[in-house]
Image (tube, helix red, strand yellow):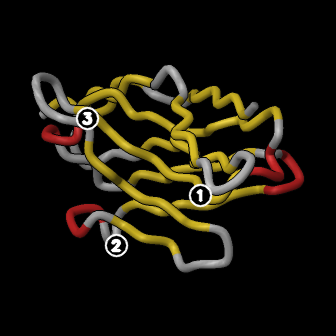
Amino acid sequence: QVQLVESGGGLVQAGESLKLSCVVSGDTFNIASMGWYRQPPGKQRELVASQSRGADINYAEVVKGRFTFSRDNAKNTVYLQMNTLRPEETGVYYCHAIELSVGDAQYNVWGKGTEVTVSS
């Protein structure tokens, strides 16, 4: 099974940057997709960026040009570089993976999240 551990959250001012990391462990060869989601206070979780195996990176429209999803396969780590942060981007950021299993089964795997606070 896959485990995800995020880090890198914190308190920044509007316009500043943060880089989140997600260390992936377990059956990493079963991973079909990796991504980052966020959940603002009182709102639903939303996609920030994701990448399926062999495919292009998909970004939420609102973060295009400011956020960069990347991965270091040697370190089993995915990153989210966030630039020019906005107060409305405050929330808990979650690392996400889709893990394949026997047959056509797929499982959503979530980290515990890392909190990002952007002050105005």
* Residue 65: mark in rendering: 2
Report the Cα–Cα distance between label 2 and label 1.
Answer: 21 Å
Displayed quadrant of residue 59 = bottom left
Residue 65 picture location, percent across and down = 34, 72
Residue 33: assigned label: 1
Say which of marks 3 and 2 sits in front: 2
Question: Where does the image place residue 4, in percent across and percent down from the top left?
Answer: 64, 31
The residue drawn where x is 67% and y is 77% is 54
Residue 115 in the image, given as x and y percentages of width and height: 38, 23
Residue 120 position in % (x across, y down): 12, 34
Is 116 or 57 nearer to us in this picture?
A: 57
Q: Secondary structure at mark 1?
A: strand
With respect to residue 24, does 52 lie above or below?
below
| Circle 2: element type | loop
**Dot placed on the residue nearer the N-terminal end, 3 or 2:** 3
In this view, the mark in front (2 or 1): 1
Q: Amino acid at mark 3?
A: Gln
Q: Which residue is mark 3?
A: 13
Farthest-out residue, front: 103
- Identified by mark 1, the residue type is Ser
In the image, which is nearer the foreground, mark 3 or mark 1? 1
